[in-house]
Structure formats: structure tokens, C-alpha cells
């Protein structure tokens, strides 16, 4: 669905990507993690065609994003971190935006607004940032665009809305769709994403599926100093040491995304070697 | 609503949707600014008439007022129309809207040139 080869991109003299390769497949929800300034939003904007690769190639559903053809624009929806909705009411805005997306479903939109408890009356600008974000997410999902790009979608959502967000996204994915979510809030995407991509210094540091991670790595709590010494990463917790170990005997454990993220940043080479 | 045409450069039905969407989202500032333009013209001509002892305005003065006013208002409207591209918050939805760049440009030209000139002239005449 999305193929990126040898992507080079720089803001004036500050290089962001230097030969980035990435492949995103349909039927998956990808979590894009990385420190501030590593290029998560820049990557999303390159995929969306807002920014143009200085070298390399991006292919999205057979289109070159930079050309911004209407047929391509109708096949993705970008939920930016910062946005401004127009100064009109919701029904009117949807009435004018829906015809641009051939697969837009009014029924789905109504279901999402009900799920998110979005007020449908009143001016969009009078709503809170969180409510506006829920509207944008509902529109994004109701377009049924094969590719959804979301930049920090859980920012501004309250605790209840975050769990609704996970529920709604999990229900919206099918074998034809691909969702790429960029976030700092690793915990917000737990039990939702099925692939993890970690960006660091302009390249993909880690790109694996949750299933593969669960097969290869073991997440456990331990008080055994010997086990702690063997860990790829460890951190103290109230119940003992939280450890990340190689899963040598195929034991079942639930991947802790936050711990995995920190482990990859501190011990990426060793962890990636286990997946080779 | 009409389905989107497969034509990637220009589709009249898509452009019509774009023009309608632009109007519905921006009609409030347009109408307010037109009222302001009408008000400013009224004040300017009242001033001119008052300073010439209530004599009819000379054609040259009327022509100069019209052209200078149109130029200034045109600059203001053009900057207002393209201001969307200056703000990331507004530029991203505008760029990602499924219409071609040519259609978006034509839509802006429609509002900036034809609508502005006709509205300005109407305000000038009345």
C-alpha cells in the first residue's frame, strides 16, 4: 500500500531522512513512535504529498503523492495534530465535504458521532479541541479511505474518549485499509496496533509486528538478579524488576510497548539481531 | 450530490463542489468585509462631497477613487484568500482536499477577481 525507498528529506540544512526505506501493508494498524524531532510528522507529510522527497521514491496505492491528484487525495485522509475546522455547523460542513470522498458513509459517520458523544448542533469553532478532534477522526473513518494518516490523534482526548478511540479504530480496520498512527503516547495505542515502527535519527530503527515481537521477546517481572543480568532491558517497578528478555522457550507474554520503545532506543542493535 | 469525475485536471462537478464549499466556509468574512467596503466608500465620498461644498464629484475623482479603492481592496482580498496557505492548520486540509491544484486556483481566482470586482462595483454604484 505504501512503499518508501531511499527517502532523503531535509529542512534547509537540517537533514531529517537519509535513505529511509519502509513498507506498509493493507489490513494493519501501524504505530509510529520516536523522540521529538525525529521526523514522524515529516514522514506522514511526505506520504500525504505535502512535502516532496529530495531523493528516493514514495508510492502510495500506485500514486506519487507529490502530484496530489484528486484520485489520490480521495484515497487517504490525514488527521493532523494541529488543525482548524471552519466557522460553520457540523451538518453543513459534512454536507459539503462528503461528496469529495466517493466511499463516504453517512451511516458510519452518525455511528461514530454517537460513539464519541459529539454534539451535532452549534458552530464547530465553539467546540473544545478534544471534540473537534473527535469530529475529524469520525470524518476520517467515515470516508472509508484505504489509507488513514493520524498525527497524535489521542492528544486532547480525555481518558474515556481514548478508550473509545481504540474501540472505534479497531472496528474500522479491514483487509483493504491501512492506518498509520504517529504518537508519543505509546500507552494510548496498546492493544490496538499490530505493527510497531520506531524512527530514530532519520531511519527506521525498529519495524516489527506485535505477533513477531511476542514470539521473539519475553516481557516479565522478576526478582531474580541472575535473570535481571541477562535482560536486554530492565527497569524497577513496585513488584520487582520489569525485564525484557529473549523469548528462548516460546513463553507467552503481553508486549509492553512503552518498555519495548525504551529498550529499542537503548539497546536497539541487540534487539534487532534477535529478529534477523 | 454529483459523484467525483475521474478527470484529474479539471472536472466541472468537482469544481462546483469546491466553489460551494469555499462559499459556505468563508461567506461570513466575505459579507462582513463587503459591508465594511461599502461603509468606507460611503465615508470617503461623503468626505469628498463635504470638502467640495456639496458640488457633484468630478469624473476624474470618481474614476481615481474607484481604481485606487479596487486596487487596495483587491490586495486585501487576495491576501485573505491565500492566507490559508500561510497557516499550517488551514493549509493541510486545503491541500489534502480531493480537488486538483488547477481547480483550487480557479476557485480562488473566481472569488478574488470576478466576485470581488462585481461586488465592489455594486457597492460603488449604490
Image: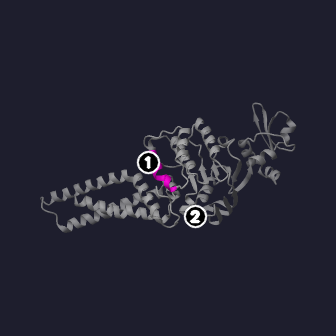
Q: Quadrant of residue A64?
A: bottom right
Return the x and y of residue A134 as percentages of the image width and height. 54, 43
Judging from the image, what secondary structure is the residue with disc 1 in?
Answer: helix
Q: Which mark is residue B72?
A: none
The answer to whether tags 2 and 1 share a subunit is yes
Q: Chain of mark 2?
A: A
Q: Which residue ends up furthest to the top in the rendered image? A: A238
Q: Main secondary structure of the magenta part?
A: helix
> What residue is rendered at 75% in x and 45% in y?
A263
Q: Quadrant of residue A25?
A: bottom right
- Which image quarter holds the C terminus of chain A? bottom right
- In terms of sequence position, does the residue under pointer 2 or pointer 1 come before the other? 2
Return the x and y of residue A172 as percentages of the image width and height. 62, 46
Along the viewing direction, whichever of A275 and A69 lies nearer the viewer: A69
> What residue is rendered at 55% in x and 64% in y?
A69
Reply yes or no: does residue A97 show up in magenta: yes
Q: Which residue is mark 2?
A: A66
Q: Chain of mark 1?
A: A
Residue A16 lies, with reference to residue A171, above or below; the image says below
Q: Which residue is mark 1?
A: A92
Which residue range is magenta in the image? A87-100
- Which image quarter holds the N terminus of chain A? bottom right
Q: Nearer the viewer, mark 2 or mark 1?
A: 1
Residue A12 in view of the camera = no
> What residue is rendered at 36% in x and 64% in y?
B113
Label 1 packing within 10 angstroms: few (<14), some (14-19), many (20+): few
Return the x and y of residue A55 as percentages of the image width and height. 65, 66
Residue A203 lies, with reference to residue A126, above or below; the image says below
Judging from the image, what secondary structure is the residue with disc 2 in?
Answer: helix
Return the x and y of residue A23 as percentages of the image width and height. 70, 58
Label 2 packing within 10 angstroms: few (<14), some (14-19), many (20+): some
Amino acid at each position: 500500500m505504501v512503499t518508501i525507498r531511499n527517502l532523503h528529506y531535509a529542512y534547509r540544512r537540517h537533514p531529517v531522512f537519509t535513505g529511509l526505506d519502509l513498507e506498509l501493508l493493507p489490513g494493519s494498524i501501524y504505530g509510529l513512535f520516536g523522540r521529538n524531532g525525529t521526523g514522524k510528522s515529516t514522514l506522514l507529510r511526505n506520504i500525504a504529498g505535502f512535502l516532496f522527497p529530495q531523493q528516493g521514491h514514495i508510492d502510495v496505492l500506485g500514486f506519487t503523492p507529490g502530484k496530489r491528484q484528486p484520485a489520490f487525495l480521495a484515497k487517504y485522509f490525514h488527521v493532523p495534530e494541529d488543525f482548524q475546522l471552519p466557522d460553520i455547523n457540523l451538518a453543513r460542513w459534512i454536507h459539503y465535504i462528503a461528496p469529495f470522498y466517493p466511499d463516504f458513509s453517512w451511516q458510519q459517520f452518525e455511528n461514530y458521532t454517537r460513539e464519541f458523544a459529539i454534539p451535532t448542533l452549534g458552530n464547530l469553532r465553539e467546540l473544545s479541541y478534544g471534540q473537534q478532534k473527535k469530529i475529524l477522526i469520525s470524518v476520517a473513518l467515515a470516508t472509508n479511505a484505504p489509507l488513514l494518516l493520524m498525527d497524535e490523534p489521542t492528544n486532547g482526548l480525555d481518558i474515556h474518549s481514548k478508550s473509545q478511540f481504540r474501540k472505534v479504530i479497531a472496528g474500522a480496520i479491514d483487509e483493504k485499509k491501512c492506518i498509520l498512527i504517529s504518537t508519543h503516547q505509546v500507552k494510548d495505542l496498546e492493544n490496538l496496533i499490530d505493527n510497531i515502527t520506531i524512527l530514530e535519527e532519520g531511519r527506521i530503527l525498529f519495524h516489527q509486528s506485535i505477533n513477531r515481537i511476542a514470539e521473539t521477546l519475553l516481557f516479565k517481572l522478576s526478582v531474580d538478579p541472575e535473570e535481571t543480568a541477562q535482560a536486554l532491558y530492565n527497569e524497577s517497578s513496585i513488584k520487582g524488576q520489569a525485564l525484557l528478555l529473549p523469548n528462548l522457550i516460546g513463553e507467552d507474554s503481553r508486549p509492553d510497548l512503552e518498555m519495548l520503545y525504551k529498550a529499542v532506543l537503548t539497546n536497539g542493535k541487540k534487539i534487532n539481531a534477535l529478529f534477523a | 450530490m454529483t459523484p467525483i469525475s475521474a478527470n484529474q485536471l479539471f472536472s466541472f462537478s468537482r469544481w462546483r463542489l469546491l466553489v460551494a464549499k469555499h462559499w459556505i466556509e468563508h461567506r461570513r468574512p466575505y459579507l462582513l468585509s463587503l459591508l465594511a467596503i461599502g461603509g468606507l466608500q460611503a465615508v470617503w465620498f461623503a468626505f469628498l462631497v463635504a470638502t467640495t461644498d456639496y458640488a457633484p464629484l468630478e469624473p476624474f475623482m470618481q474614476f481615481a477613487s474607484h481604481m485606487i479603492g479596487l486596487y487596495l481592496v483587491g490586495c486585501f482580498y487576495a491576501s485573505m484568500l491565500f492566507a490559508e496557505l500561510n497557516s499550517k492548520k488551514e493549509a493541510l486540509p486545503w491541500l489534502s482536499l480531493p480537488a486538483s491544484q488547477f481547480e483550487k486556483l480557479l476557485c480562488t481566482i473566481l472569488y478574488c477577481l470576478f466576485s470581488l470586482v462585481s461586488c465592489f462595483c455594486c457597492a460603488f454604484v449604490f
